[in-house]
Image (cartoon, rainbow, N blue to C red):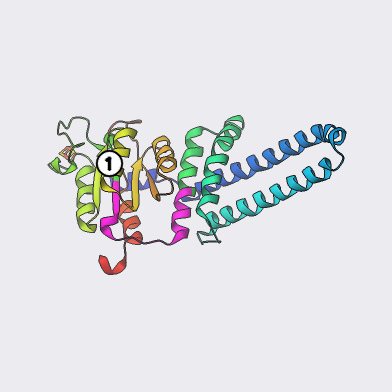
Amino acid sequence: MEKNSVQKMKINSRSKYLYLLLSLSSLCLLMGLTTLLWWFIAPRLDDIYEILRPISLALLRLFFLILLIGVSTVMLTSIFEKNFLIVKFAVNLYNRIMYPITIFLGTICGVSRERIRESFVHVNNSFIKASRQQFRPEEILILLPHCLQNNECKIRLSNDIYNCERCGKCDIAGLLSIAENFKVSIAIANGGTLARRIVLKFRPKFIVAVACDRDLVSGIQDVFPLPVYGILNIRPEGPCFNTRVDLDKLSATLQKIIYEEKR
Ligand code: SF4
């Protein structure tokens, strides 16, 4: 594929704002529904014990305050890619609780799941950039999907990706050169189960994963708190078939994440 056509297909880095906006709207919706629920049950609380009503209202306000502080911190971290006292469990809660609600709200608003998942990957990457963590090459794993391999290539790569003969018909050859250049591990998986096995085998401290939006979201959530930088694959011939990857973007990511003195 021509380089400029790859450039055209690059996903807009600003797309993290879609997920942030939708998740903020989901939070407001959640707060509204909780308040409505409290408003309905408040008279019953009075019947049980008079003090229950002010206590439950105070607890609800405290809950909202914690939620607002937590979400604002997470949002600021993502927008400015600076660490605003970010704590891993806050990100985890944000991802796990807000993700299904955000998907639900987005679907109602007519936003496709694919766009929301892509945006989620950008938000996840912004958390990683904000953390400013760096790793040694041996702590890093590049994890690839099977669909990057040219469909006509009969070489079995799942056991050892270095079986590739580097004919250049797909991006595997370029990816191997990048892995060798940066001295990082690289593996290919043809499904979630094999991907988990590969992670257990290599025990990386940082993963650069190339995949479609759906696999990246499930992978990121599966291995949390292990940091996964997601790179969305390019699908010029449709999903799961002869997919491509922006090699420059992958190199740039590794460049930033690897200790300078080790390169
Ligand atoms: S680059 Fe490697 S994996 Fe891709 S088609 Fe050629 S031999 Fe097969």
Q: Is residue 53 left or right of residue 77?
A: right
What residue is shown at x 80% (from left), y 32% (from top)? 41
What residue is shown at x 39% (from left), y 48% (from top)? 228
Across and down, in percent, residue 119 comes to: 49, 43
Q: Name the one closer to the observer, 65 or 123.
A: 65
Tell me if I can see residue 243 in this picture: no
Q: Quadrant of the image for the N terminus?
A: top left
What residue does disc 1 label? 198
Dot 1 falls on a residue whose secondary structure is: helix
Q: Quadrant of the image for the C terminus?
A: bottom left
Across and down, in percent, residue 43 comes to: 86, 33
Q: Is residue 25 left or right of residue 174?
A: right
Across and down, in percent, residue 44 comes to: 83, 31
Q: Name the one closer to the observer, 257 or 13.
A: 257
Q: Name the one closer to the observer, 174 or 262.
A: 262
Asked whether mark 1 and ligand 1 are closer than 8 Å, the reply comes as no
Span highlighted in magenta in the image: 124-142
Across and down, in percent, residue 251 comes to: 30, 55
Tell me if I can see residue 34 in this picture: yes
Residue 110 among those drawn in magenta: no
Residue furthest bottom in the image: 261
Quadrant containing ligand 1: top left
Residue 129 among those drawn in magenta: yes
Q: Label 1 is placed on what type of residue?
A: Ile
| Label 1 Cα crowd, 10 Å radius (few <14 / some 14-19 / many 20+) | some
Q: Is residue 243 left or right of residue 121?
A: left
What residue is shown at x 32% (from left), y 39% (from top)? 196
Quarter assignment of residue 34: top right
Q: Is residue 94 above or below residue 73?
A: above
Q: Is residue 252 above or below residue 195?
A: below
What residue is shown at x 82% (from left), y 35% (from top)? 45
Q: Is residue 217 above or below residue 205?
A: above
